[in-house]
Image (cartoon, grey):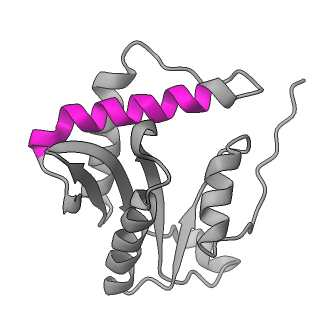
Amino acid sequence: MQIVEYEEKYLEDVKDLLVELEEYLVSIDKDELDRVHPEYREKMALYDLADVNNNNGKCYLAIDNDRVVGLIMGCIFPYQEHDYLDYKCPNRGEITELIVTEKVRSKGIGKQLMNKMEAYFKEKGCEYVFVEVFGYNDRGFNFYSKDGYHNRMYHMIKKI
């Protein structure tokens, strides 16, 4: 298994992994707000990769037997002018996607992908890494918590 930077020849595998991730999120969404739109597979990877390209980001892939078994995407988003009014605005990277296919989970691949992205962020002068975890994603929350991540804010919802 090796970690490599994204190449277009892996686009179909990336699309499949992102669909797998979204289907998992749909399956645990107690609010039933998430969905896999019929155009999701064809469009979402392109949107995510455009974010990476436009925001000083990277996409790394875990390759096993010439097949993508995991991916991580991260960006270094710019702050808005008003952010400086109430926030110190340290340099920070943001993990935007992370998935390891179900068949090979719990083998350290996610950790290897995280290490690669964190090294990239550090090389770019980032002091912090941010990641959003879906509120019902206990597996994701536990994964990040074990790696030293902690809550800073809560995003709350109420149906009216």
Residue in view at x 19 percent, y 37 percent: 11
Residue in view at x 41 percent, y 75 percent: 118
Give the x, y percent position of residue 10: 16, 41
Residue 136 in the figure: left or right of residue 97: right
Residues 152 and 141: in front is 141
Give the x, y percent position of residue 20: 44, 30
Residue 27 in the figure: left or right of residue 96: right
In magenta stretch: residue 17: yes
Give the x, y percent position of residue 76: 40, 68
Q: Can residue 50 be seen in this view?
A: yes
Q: Is residue 15 above or below residue 36?
A: below
Residues 50 and 15: in front is 15
* Highlighted range, magenta: 8-26
Q: In this view, does 38 lie above or below 53?
A: above
For residue 59, what is the image quadrant? bottom left
- Which quadrant: the C terminus? top right
Q: In this view, does 123 lie above or below 11?
A: below
Q: Is residue 53 above or below residue 11?
A: below
For residue 124, what is the image quadrant? bottom left
In magenta stretch: residue 160: no
